[in-house]
């Protein structure tokens, strides 16, 4: 079967560039995510049976059920999962992307980002705040629960009101701008959070009549959360990546995932199959007291940002990241430059000032990854064996899943 | 007379680094600037007689008098200046710094920035907004007047209220952070304006009871003014630079100025004398339709930022500046690196991510400038012959004023 792969990839690339993500709402997952139900917990990675979840990711999934009130204690919850009375699902199959373990429950608020150009929608739940102990990092206690509840009942509803009152907030202009202000929109979202806060403020002001205290809480949360925008960036990136999904003959990556079993990629022309491989490698910068032996892979789909030309693919826009994830400016530049070898093109919106406003490398081609051996560079937070964040680092995807995806692609479309 | 110049310069350098600028108030100039009076117009440059002001700077001074209502028309105002019934003064002699022509009148609101560490105060008036036609660029008409009046009566008083309610806003934390977000705090203040806005929000909210419309106007002004923070950065820089003023035996520059007669510098150990030289040179990026022949030097003291290690001395923090003032990232890096040759040290607060968080080159030494021939690099907006901003560029200070300052320094302190 003769296909024009370049033409198909150009379509996929263009669809990513042309996508127009707009934050249209903030609602509980159950109200807006197709297929979500009250007995369902979503987590990063491919859809696998509950008994295949191990370690910190398994714990995080069970903690999700506890948070949602589906069981009173850990053992009961585990038993209910085993019996199928509580179910687990893969985020990407529900239009969601998981940050680290990526736990979604029915009552959790999610950002609803619509791609106004192509009509698809991406979702992401909320950043939990600056504590190192967070559910998405596989940790759960009363503090984690209370903070999640506070976001659910006090923060998210007001942000939702403001977003609706704004008639939606177009995200590309904020994202474009943040890249000129030291963000790469994965591990650094400081500028985007500020820009988003400014968009929101006039609407919060209008809503403030008689409830200043509530609005002040929202402002405080925004002020102390430099990563607040990450989840919006992820939902936007999901909406952008999905625009390139299902293009016949395209070898462009539309999703990447880390889960407790390894690493996976999806390819535009190969449907929703995950091509799996081993865990990624990492150059970590760990919080004091931790070593690389403490790192555990409990999931991660924030690399949806890299999938659309952000994060590691825009590292040279965010030299300030050094202090968070280590590395030198020179290494960041080299990492970023290398990514141009494995993509379909240069982003028409996301530009990197250090590269003279060159568009960021966008739309990863599995064949180029396989042929060059250059694998995606990913900026990422790192979870520890006992839960919680223990640092951050520059993660390198494993080549194997790109190899098997490339083989599958050639089996289906030929190697011409 | 034997002096330890290195020790004196270290004192001056340390005082700059240790200064703690805090925005404590916003008030009409007449209420807070020592020596300000209703018949006085301040402008950039050394104190010179009115008849020595020429071209656009002379016009700007006269326009100031018109704005203040000291005369009904241009000719009458000029005559009153000539008779000494309206007076003109140099900004720096009043603790002020002038942006371009730098026109201050009695009723104009100014930022009051106190250096909490050493007790001195710096002032700067307000950014006029995004129009290219502004009084500080030597342009004046009804629109310019109305905009200045709006700032005076509607914007500044509310910002002042919020600042007082906040109990003052410490500026170093905002400035430090903005340098990690693509600002160099002279020709780029996008992040700092956002950070300042966020500081202000919660106080504006508290003030909003019954006057949402007024607060919304302030928010709109902040949202559309990426250069809003420049004037705060200038007042802070003035407070920082003045901390290093008058250190016996120090050859550190404490002020630089451009005026219609040329360029001038002041030196810590040489009192308040201005050492004068010719105009600077410039690599300009002009708005469409203009050529370098259209540039006119009508004043400029925003280079107080370079005096304390910002602006051109932090260019490599702000690659996004390319789109405003031209130049390549490589040139910005080289410019910035060269500045380390002519300063006393590396700033302990202002750090440049691209340089691996190296402190910005701080405290210009006139002897090092004279000896190396390397002159300060300055980021600057450019005024046109007919008034208004016509572009921006990378300006290079002339060596002559540093030479004559170095000679005066050696005459006084010896050349040991």
Image: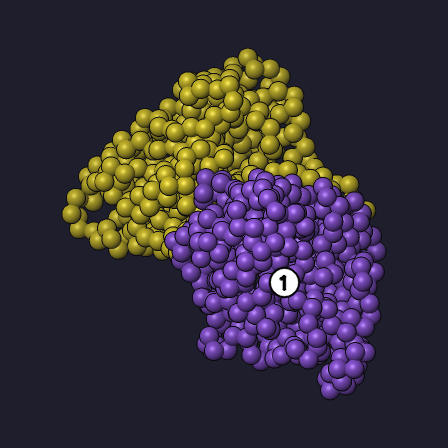
Chain colours: A purple, B yellow
Residue at image location 67% in from the left, 55% down from the top: A271
Instruction: Using the image as rendered, state which of residue A118 and residue B153 is in the foreground.
Output: A118
State the residue lying farthest toward the left: B416
> Does residue A87 appear to the left or right of B358 in the view shown?
right
**Percent from the top left, x then y, of residue B406?**
24, 38
| Front-lying residue, B189 or B75 | B189
User: Relative to residue B63, is residue A206 depicted above or below?
Assistant: below
Q: Does residue B138 sit above or below B319 in this rendering?
A: above
Q: Which residue is drawn at the image coordinates 23% and 51% (left, top)?
A: B5
Seen as rendered, the residue at the extreme front is A1
* A216 sits left or right of B326 in the view: right
Residue A366 seen in render: yes
In x, y percent, where is residue B344?
A: 30, 50
Q: Residue B48, located in which quarter of the rendered image?
A: top left
- Per the image, label 1 sits on a secondary structure element best described as loop
**Residue B358 location (% of width, % of height):** 38, 55
Residue A262 lies in what quarter of the image? bottom right
Question: Most extreme residue toward the top, as rendered?
Answer: B75
Residue depicted at x 44% and y 51%:
A338
Percent x, y of residue B291: 44, 19
User: Mark 1 = which residue?
Assistant: A274
Question: With B325 as the anchor, is A22 left or right in this view?
Answer: right
């Amino acid at each position: 079967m003769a296909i024009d792969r370049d033409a198909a990839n150009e379509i996929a690339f263009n669809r990513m560039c042309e996508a127009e993500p707009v934050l249209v709402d903030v609602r509980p997952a159950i109200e807006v995510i197709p297929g979500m139900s009250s007995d369902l917990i979503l987590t990063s990675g491919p859809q696998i049976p509950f008994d295949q979840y191990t370690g910190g990711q398994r714990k995080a999934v069970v903690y999700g059920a506890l948070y949602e009130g589906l069981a009173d204690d850990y053992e009961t919850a585990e038993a209910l999962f085993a019996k199928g009375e509580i179910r687990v699902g893969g985020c990407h199959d529900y239009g969601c992307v998981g940050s680290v373990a990526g736990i979604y429950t029915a009552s959790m608020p999610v950002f609803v980002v619509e791609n106004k150009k192509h009509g698809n929608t991406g979702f992401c739940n909320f950043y939990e705040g600056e504590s190192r102990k967070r559910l998405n990092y596989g940790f759960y206690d009363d503090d984690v629960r209370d903070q999640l509840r506070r976001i659910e009942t006090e923060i998210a509803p007001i942000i939702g009101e403001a977003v609706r009152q704004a008639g939606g907030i177009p995200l590309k202009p904020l994202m474009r701008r943040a890249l000129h202000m030291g963000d790469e929109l994965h591990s650094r979202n400081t500028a985007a959070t500020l820009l988003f806060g400014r968009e929101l403020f006039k609407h919060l002001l209008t809503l403030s009549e008689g409830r200043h205290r509530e609005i002040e809480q929202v402002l405080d949360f925004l002020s102390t959360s430099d990563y607040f925008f990450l989840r919006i960036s992820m939902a936007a990136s999901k909406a952008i990546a999905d625009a390139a999904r299902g293009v016949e003959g395209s070898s462009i990556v539309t999703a990447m995932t880390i889960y407790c079993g390894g690493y996976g990629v999806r390819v535009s022309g190969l449907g929703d199959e995950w091509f799996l491989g081993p865990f990624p490698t990492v150059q970590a910068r760990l919080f004091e007291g931790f070593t690389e032996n403490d790192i555990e892979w409990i999931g991660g789909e924030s690399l949806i940002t890299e999938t659309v030309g952000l994060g590691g693919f825009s590292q040279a826009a965010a030299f300030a990241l050094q202090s968070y994830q280590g590395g030198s400016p020179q290494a960041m530049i080299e990492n970023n430059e290398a990514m141009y070898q494995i993509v379909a093109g240069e982003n028409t919106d996301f530009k990197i000032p250090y590269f003279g406003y060159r568009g960021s490398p966008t739309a990863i081609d599995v064949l180029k990854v396989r042929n060059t051996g250059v694998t995606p560079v990913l900026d990422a937070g790192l979870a520890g064996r006992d839960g919680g964040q223990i640092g951050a680092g520059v993660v390198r995807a494993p080549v194997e899943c790109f190899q098997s995806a490339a083989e599958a692609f050639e089996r289906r479309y030929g190697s011409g």
